[in-house]
């Protein structure tokens, strides 16, 4: 499954790692959306930041998470980084680092698909731990 997580980095456009400061200690804004996973299966992206997020979540800095499950399969789950999920800390459009370890726990998925949970991630530049409530955003992505 590690190869599958690595393939998801293409969705996020992960470049070679650059110098980055430590990730934020918590976030105040979050969105969740559909994305294509390995073999064109369903996956869920979650973007966490302090800034308002528009229709295309390219706000920096942010922590982006990709979970290799459809949103309807997340509630009550715990997803390990590099096994069931991947995560990246983006300081800017060309400055990112991949999580070394961690876990994303999903407490609930509401009827409007708001995803609530906790991210506990270790990046080369530091630890990121934050609760989140990610409003569902239509991504208009179709998998081949």
Image (cartoon, helix red, strand yellow):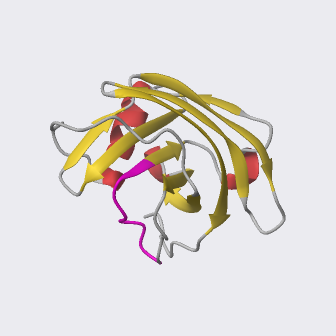
Q: Position of residue 130 (x, y in %)?
A: 59, 39
**Residue at left offset 16%, top offset 36%:** 19
Residue 13 versus residue 25 in the image, above or below? below
Q: Is residue 27 magenta?
A: no
**Residue at left offset 75%, top offset 53%:** 72
Q: Position of residue 102 (x, y in %)?
A: 52, 24
Residue 88 versus residue 79 in the image, above or below? below
Q: Is residue 38 left or right of residue 46?
A: left
Q: Position of residue 52 (x, y in %)?
A: 49, 70
Residue 95 versus residue 60 in the image, above or below? above
Between 19 and 39, the one nearer to me in the picture: 19
Q: Is residue 103 left or right of residue 110?
A: left
Q: Position of residue 137 (x, y in %)?
A: 59, 71
Magenta range: 55-63
Q: Image quadrant for the C terminus?
A: bottom left
Q: Residue furthest right?
A: 111
Please tell me whether the stretch drawn in magenta is mainly helix, strand or loop. loop
**Residue at left offset 44%, top offset 48%:** 64
């Amino acid at each position: 499954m590690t190869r599958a997580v690595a393939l998801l980095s293409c969705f996020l456009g992960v470049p070679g790692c650059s110098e980055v400061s430590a990730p934020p200690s918590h976030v105040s804004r979050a969105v969740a959306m559909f994305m294509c996973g390995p073999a064109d299966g369903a996956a869920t992206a979650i973007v966490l930041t302090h800034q308002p997020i528009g229709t295309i979540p390219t706000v920096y800095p942010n922590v982006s998470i990709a979970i290799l499950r459809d949103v309807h399969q997340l509630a009550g789950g715990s997803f390990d980084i590099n096994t069931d999920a991947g995560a990246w800390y983006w300081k800017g459009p060309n400055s990112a680092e991949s999580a070394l370890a961690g876990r994303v726990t999903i407490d609930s998925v509401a009827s409007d698909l708001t995803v609530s949970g906790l991210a506990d991630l270790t990046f080369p530049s530091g630890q990121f731990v934050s609760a989140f409530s990610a409003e569902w955003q239509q991504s208009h992505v179709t998998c081949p």
